[in-house]
Image (cartoon, coloured by chain):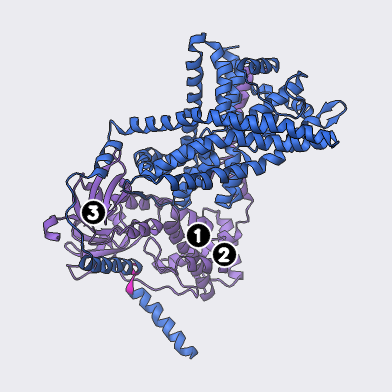
Amino acid sequence: MKNDTDEILLTANKLRWEVGENFHDSILESIYKDASEISSKVVIQDGEKSKFDLDRFIDRIVTGKWTGFPIMFILLAVVFWITIVGANVPSGWIASLLVDTLHPLMKNFFNSIQIPWWITGVLIDGAYLAAAWVISVMLPPMAIFFPMFTLLEDFGYLPRVAFNMDNLYRRVGAHGKQALTMSMGFGCNAAGVIATRIIDSPRERLIAIITNNFSLCNGRWPTQILIATIFIGGTVPAYLAGLASAAAVVTIAILGVLFSLIVSWGLSRTVLKGEASAFSLELPPYRPPRLLQTLYTSLIDRTIFVLWRAVVFAVPAGVVIWLVANIQIGGLSLAEYFIHTVDPFALFIGLNGVIILAYIIAIPANEIVIPTVLMLTALSTKMAMGAGAGVMFELDSVSDTANILHAGGWTLLTGINLMLFSLLHNPCSTTIYTIYKETKNVKWTMLSTFIPIVMGLLICFFVTQIWRLFVA
Amino acid sequence: MDPLLALLIGVLILVMLYFLFKPQRGLVSRLVKMKKDRSRELIEDALKHLYDCEYKGVDCSLNSISGSLYISGERSANIISMLEAMNLISNVENKITLTPEGRSYALRVIRVHRLLEKYLAEKTSVSETDWHVIAEEKEHELSREQTNKLAAQLGNPLIDPHGDPIPSESGEIPVRKGLTLNNLESGKFATIIHIEDEPKEVYAQLSALKLYPGMQIYLLENAKGRISFEADGEECVLAPVLASNITVYPIVEKEKVKESFETLSSLKQDEEAIVVGISKAMRGQQRRRLLDFGIVPGTIVRAQLKSLSGDPTGYEIRGATIALRKNQSDLIYVKRVDRKLVA
């Protein structure tokens, strides 16, 4: 028996040499050949294709030399416009319910049943407020942006965008579909990272994951708009203010796209050089989008999923935010100690201690960075603003917000640097966790976390020194 | 701090970091390389060199070892005495030969090297010119179990991407008969079975010509100083020095030789053609992906639409539209046909 098997193995080994290395290919090819022969015999195709092919007509327009880009930009701009304008109203409703109404109610209730003030602080002012804030600012834009994006995808337009953009992405070693995951990142980076599943080549997918954070996400647009309005809009005559601040925000977003291309290029030539890569892109036929299904999948799969992760991270962060502002040693809170320690370094690179601390403790969501900054500024300048230490707040009036920031020592340079740093800093914890979930690799997670921080600190440093050299 | 000073210091630190951490030639990677124990590496490289000499039928000396390993004569004398002590070589009257144990060790190292090259070609996107360099470095790091695991992962391949046979685990290596291209007569058909990957400069030139093992060629002219042949429908001219790095196997039956074909990328919009084959230069995952789309001999493809910037192009393949980049469609061979004849 033993001899028989040995003999068979020996013969097999000899034969392997004789059949040659193309053996696998030949088998595969002959299978396809047989299959197509059989199908050509038994499958009957009805009628001739009609002269006017709608798919071809649409394709000609959306990939045309003169029509392709304008259509792409207009569609994207419309999607953003609807998102930003449409999200304002429901955001206001949710905020007035969760933050303005329920928060005081719960606080009063806790006080009335004699619960110690610090428990109320940790639970209501910290954990609850952070979660409420995240929901109210995150939910409406995502619930509007994702369904619209999914509709375009379902219709068949998005693969054509990837097709049009591929040449650019090929040059930096990436996949055309990265244009889509990047646009998705404008809605939410965590969702953008999940969306990279559409890229089936391992190397290109990793590039798309690591560079997704360079898309200015939903949580950072309000920060950009607020800071641009206060600092950039303030430098020009009133009738130009709106235009100037809008231009500044768009510049930051375009800068983000540029950085994502540069970093993609660098990654594909260094750390990701050896990862496997295979390009393919299917252009599916156009079809009428399925409204209800789209609404369901984009709300459940994307919005609720991402929102839940964000809330899970926001709760402990809320606790930390409240604690650092309230735990006092020798009359100074932990937050103030940190701010004073970091201030010399932070001011040197054109930021300040408050910003650095806010970006550390507001890691769960970019949405709560500005409320945290305002709270910390009020705390560190001993200003009687907001609702006390550790309670995040926002002001309805831009000029009041400007007053707080100016009192905190902010200048035009601080504003510009904050805008840059808001673009170039670590992804929020929800995104970091999602990156780990998607790559199952600590190295890539660390890389995607620290590349933007290092870039952000460096760029703030250089901008500040050059500014001081030429402007001030 | 004075901003100008800060700026200068900042730039200086960046430049310093660059030189410290530059991959391959940076200070840090050099230090790591220097600190590494190189004895295993040197022993294995020396054995490989000795095997190479034996294979080519030339004598091997202390000088040729120090030459090929870039080490001093003194150091190679050390290595030789070490190898002798390990009973891997015998040194009689300055003629160094491998013992059977030494030969089997050398073949094991060669096995790892060729498996690594196969791995790099099939599973990664590392460029062709880097395969040898990386394999040369990593071949000393794999244990026997790791090597067998790698071989199993690759489906126990027999031939590396350069066309060299991969020795079996027990150190057997089949001999492939063939002759170097400069010895092929005019008017003969042949298959390339091996392209030597050393020296690196020569290999870079040959791979730039897109020659690959398995490619069928037709020798047009073998004159002094110039060898011209047809490969995939294009005429190539090589100097004999370069041609001697290519091993070919003559083919007798003429009909088996591929005619000259056009590439898929040459199709203009709305033109149709039949797929004849995919170049061997398309490997691994990428090749399987194309086969999955149904790009196999006999499939009709039609160039359907060009992207905004001209690359990629969408092809209609078996009822679906698939976008392919130009560097992919360059490697797919097609034959133009009259649609009526096919139907």
A407 with respect to B241 (left or right): right
**Residue under circle 3?**
B301
B286 with respect to A30 (left or right): right
**Residue under circle 2?**
B80
Magenta range is: A19-23
Residue B266 in the image: x percent, y percent?
Answer: 22, 47
Q: Quadrant of residue A385?
A: top right
Structural distance between the alpha carbons of marks 3 and 2: 61 Å
Label 1 marks which chain's residue?
B
**Is residue B138 shown to the viewer in this render?**
yes
Chain in blue on the image: A
The kind of residue tagged 2 is: Ile
Chain in purple on the image: B
Q: Nearer the viewer, residue A444 or B109?
A: A444
The kind of residue tagged 1 is: Ile
| Pointer 1 with pointer 3, Cβ within 8 A | no
Mark earlier in primary sequence (2, 1): 1
Q: Quadrant of residue B52?
A: bottom left
Q: Residues within 10 Å of mark 2 (few under 14, many from 20)?
A: many
Circle nearer the viewer, 3 or 2: 3
Q: Residues within 10 Å of mark 1 (few under 14, many from 20)?
A: many
Picture disc at residue A127: none
Q: Secondary structure at mark 2?
A: helix
